[in-house]
Amino acid sequence: MKRLLHLAFPLAMALVFGCQISTGDYTSASGGGQPDYAPKVDAKKLKELENLSDPVVTHLERSRWGNPDTYTELGKQYRLLKTNDGYTETGMASWYGAKFHGRRTSSSQIFDMYQLTAAHKTLPIPVFARVTNLRNKKETIVLINDRGPFHADRLIDLSFAAAVKLGFHEEGTADVLIETISHERDSSLFIWIGGFEHEKQALQALEVVKARSPVPFKIVENSSAGFDIRFGPLFEGPEADRLESLLFATDYTPLRKFVD
């Protein structure tokens, strides 16, 4: 259970109150009855967190810990979903930070508030998911590897880094869309834009794109035409379509390529 209290600090740090649970042999990092707080970070660190690259989606086995069929917290019983596939839901997100930094999550992984991770009450863990802030349309991919938040109106608890990247670390909560990502949908799809005579030109183009779509990228030297930018690997569907639309809107001509 979390309640965010706004403080008159530069970061408007949120005090987060959680409820501790044990799902298997490990206790949820996204819990505990004492106040949580934001780390002390400067503008440079905040910018770094805003520009974190999304984690690469890989095949994941269910954790040995944190996946009981059912568990009870604060008198309420939770039943895990049978599968992560196709899960899509909107609801309120909160975040957890410095108090839990370095603790074990329900899946037994160590919580790092500077990584893109999250906690969810009923999704089998670990699982990758795309989270979109419905107010500002910022999005990121997170690894859900923990349980929580145990508050009636909260759907997901994000790491401090994820909250910064989604632009709500100061407010404490945000309405979000959650979409799980299955590795089976992965592909070797890359999107290229190219023909930059100088690497500096490629870097300038990259800054424009990164500001609106933080996808993995690489600048590739092209023996015949200077420099290209390669985005990916990507998922076919909305992810690739969004990037293509952005590139067209910024006057670049994207080219889809598949790599065996």
Image: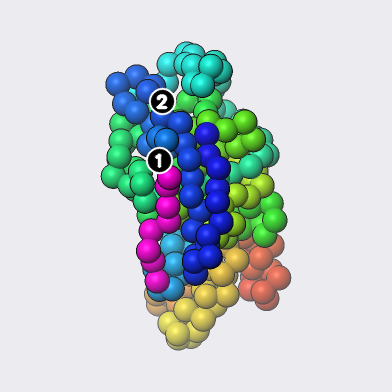
Depth check, front residue: 27 or 131: 27
Q: Position of residue 126 (x, y in %)?
A: 42, 32
Q: Residue furthest top?
A: 69
Depth check, front residue: 171 or 124: 171
Q: Position of residue 227 (x, y in %)?
A: 45, 77
Compared to 253, does 37 lie above or below? above
Residue span colored magenta: 34-42
Cα gap from disc 1 to disc 2, whole angstroms: 14 Å
- Going 64% across and 68% down the picture, which residue do you hit? 247
Q: In this view, does 79 lie to the left or right of 112?
A: right
Q: What element carries label 2?
A: loop
| Protein image colouring | rainbow
Q: Does the magenta stretch include residue 152?
A: no
Q: Position of residue 96 (x, y in %)?
A: 45, 46
Q: Is tag 1's residue or tag 2's residue first in the polypeptide sequence?
A: 2
Most common secondary structure along the magenta stretch:
loop
Q: What element carries label 1?
A: loop
Amino acid type at image mark 1: Gln
Depth check, front residue: 161 or 256: 161
Rate crowding at label 1 as few (under 14), some (14 to 19) or many (20 or more) other CA atoms within 10 Å. Answer: few
- Going 45% across and 70% down the picture, which residue do you hit? 47
Q: Quadrant of residue 249?
A: bottom right
Q: Can residue 62 be seen in this view?
A: no
Compared to 105, does 255 lie above or below? below
Look at discs 1 and 2 and give the one toward the viewer: 1
Q: Quadrant of residue 193?
A: bottom right
- Going 41% across and 25% down the picture, which residue do you hit? 21
- Residue named by callout 2: 21
Q: Residue 34 carries which label?
A: 1
